[in-house]
Amino acid sequence: MTQTPASPPPLYAPREPIFPRRVKGTYRTLKWWIMGVTLAIYYLTPWIRWDRGPNLPDQAVLVDLAGRRFYFLWIEIWPHEFYFVAGLLIMAGLGLFLFTSALGRVWCGYTCPQTVWTDLFILVERWIEGDRNARVRLWNAEWSFKKFRLRMTKWVVWFFIALATGGAWVFYFADAPTLARDLVTFDAPLVAYSTMLILTATTMVFGGFMREQVCNYMCPWPRIQAAMMDESTLTVAYRHWRGEPRGKHMKAEDADQRGDCIDCMACVNVCPAGIDIRDGQQMECITCALCIDACDEVMERIGKPRGLIDYLALSDEEAETKGAKPRPIWQHVLRPRTILYTAMWSLIGVALVYALFVRSDIDLTVEPVRNPQFVTLSDGSVRNAYTLRIRNLTAEPREFRVMLTSEEILRIDVESDGSVANHVTVPANETMQARVYVLARPQDPAADAETTDLRLWVEDVETDDRAGVATIFNGKG
Amino acid sequence: MADKKDIDEVTGTDTTGHEWDGIKELNNPLPRWWLWTFYGTVAWGLAYTIAYPAWPLINSATQGVLGYSTRAEVAQEIAAVNARNAEVSERLASADLSTLAPDDPAHRFGVAGGASVFLAHCSQCHGQGAAGVQAAGYPNLLDDAWLWGGTLEDIEFTVRHGIRNDTDPDARWSEMPAFGDILSDEEIEQTVEYVLAISGQEHDAAMAEQGMVWFQEQCTACHGDSGEGIRELGAPTLNDAIWLYGGDRDTLNETITYSRFGVMPAWGQRLDEYEIKAVTLYLHQLGGGE
């Protein structure tokens, strides 16, 4: 039988505001550095110049969607070399496995853009509205001129950060100085403005207002990463065997019965996810380690050893409860599993670097014309046509001679605008199509055979570098 | 709300208060912003169906207040492309093809545009690859044999005026008689052997010798003394390896007995100047242009 309450509890929860307190310490310093470096990479990369000669763009990192090229420093990736991108994605995946199995959600805590930008937005918030207590007061205060002024200042600063974020993104897809000028004079393409608008809005909303909601409800990584952790994975945890039973009064009668935790709530107050780490591992925890800094500060002040909250593995809990000493970090990190991931990661990396260095700067594809398979000429000769796609992957125009090799007698005739017979000039960084005719005279065996194997070649006139593709000649047989 | 909070013992989570045979439903409330996002998408969806064509009616669908239509957009895009190309296509339309340089943008534009004109208007008979259909007598346009000439001027004229049609007085015209009414069956067979002989195929030498007499009497006026063909008359070369309808004994017999009458429309009446020039350039560079 079903019972339904007359008035059910609310099924939708409003966001609980979180006011992280300022904290100092090792991890906070590390996080400041990582934030500075990652943001600098993001904002400044499009402005780095890289001279590639007169025929190619001079932007160090450029995704040229219209020209279908990707430029990264001295490397240029063509669409047919997209396997490099696939390889990098596989490496990124394996890297995530490696870091997650060794250090848990370290990506979330230190380098995820959501974390970095939220951190930056909280920094601005703290700078304008004050630290935790001031912000709580302002939150609870009635709307006044002061509250309005502080909020507006904060939002305007946020907006400019968000605008710069969306703005930096579009610079990766076009020449940055040109686009910057066009953006200001309203000559930039609509897609640049709409991309900026969308990214400005998402940065503002995600970094300023949604914050941990993005991690908890929108991001799949917390769930996926949780599945990749094991009992040796380092994660931020509370040494409850040392801290409990917790109590506020150090000088109370039963002080010697109590643990080290004085229940000061410092770890809770600094947490950007709004959780209590002492409740154990939680889905919301991004392992930003700020609670470690906060607790260490307190432990030092009350004269207890640091590390009540620390990077710990599940296996440590069992061992340390029984009285074992804390294990050094490297013992957690250096395990068969992580070594295997590192090996796989390096293997693919080495393979990609190898592929990068041995890749040819000529690429040839041959498409035999199949409709019709052959044409009979008036003197009885049999002619096949082929469409050649010759890619010149260098920054200089190149002249190629087109040749064929075959065990049978065949003649080649290249349709070209050049003055030299059977020569084709391909402009720098371009693909050129050339139609090639191959002819068998009536008395040649190839004319009456069903098919004859041949190989078509292009050879650089100056360097003799060549590329060849095997194909067939269709005869009357 | 009046109910007291009902906490599940195992998970420590609030329950909704719903109970089925003693089983209670845990309450893990959804974030409220998510609810608003849901309402937002509903509102967006409704607004979208009002703005754009959406709701099916009996004969059509609602048109949407923005008046958007994919057809109109395609037409607009085609018009925009044509406008962008107006200069080069006008230049091609007024150009003299024989003096147009191959690296002239108008030339390249014409070859590319001609390919689509060919696919739209010509490929039905001549085939997508322009190899023709021998069984039906649609000529192969890739080889080096031309009935009426393979220069740019010749091709342009043929495309513009067509062949043996009633609609264009300038159409290329010639007519081969049906020799079934003129020669006897045996005489025709002997002529066939002679044609096989001059085209280098297996033949009966005695019959061919006799056929030569009929050939010189009846055929050389159009096909030339040695069967080399006469382009002004569109009379095909007979002493080469290329056949419009086929060069085997039976097909030749049929051709001589009943004659042939291949017709091509005058495309000058259907295509505009640019299209004619473009398709001419395209045909000329297929491998047989003169």
Image: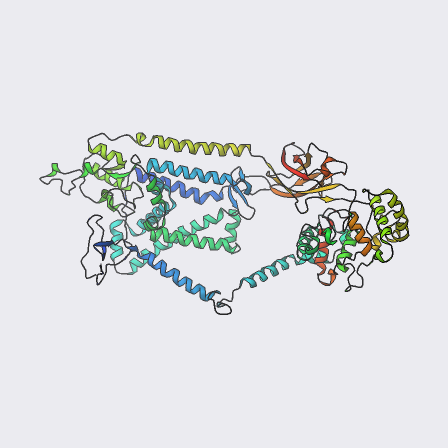
Q: Residue at x 76, y 55 (%)?
A: B156
Residue A244 lies in what quarter of the image?
top left
In the foreground, A52 or B143: B143
Q: Residue at x 80, y 50 (%)?
A: B252
Check the picture and name the quadrant holding the N terminus of chain B: bottom left
Residue A102 in picture, x, y percent from top left: 34, 35
Q: Is residue B7 visible?
A: yes
In the foreground, A167 or B283: B283
Decide: is B237 above or below B70. Answer: above
In the foreground, A391 or A140: A391
Q: Is residue A78 visible?
A: no
In the foreground, B189 or A269: B189
Residue B141 in picture, x, y percent from top left: 73, 50
Decide: is B203 above or below B17. Answer: above
Colouring used for the render: rainbow
Residue A85 in picture, x, y percent from top left: 49, 40
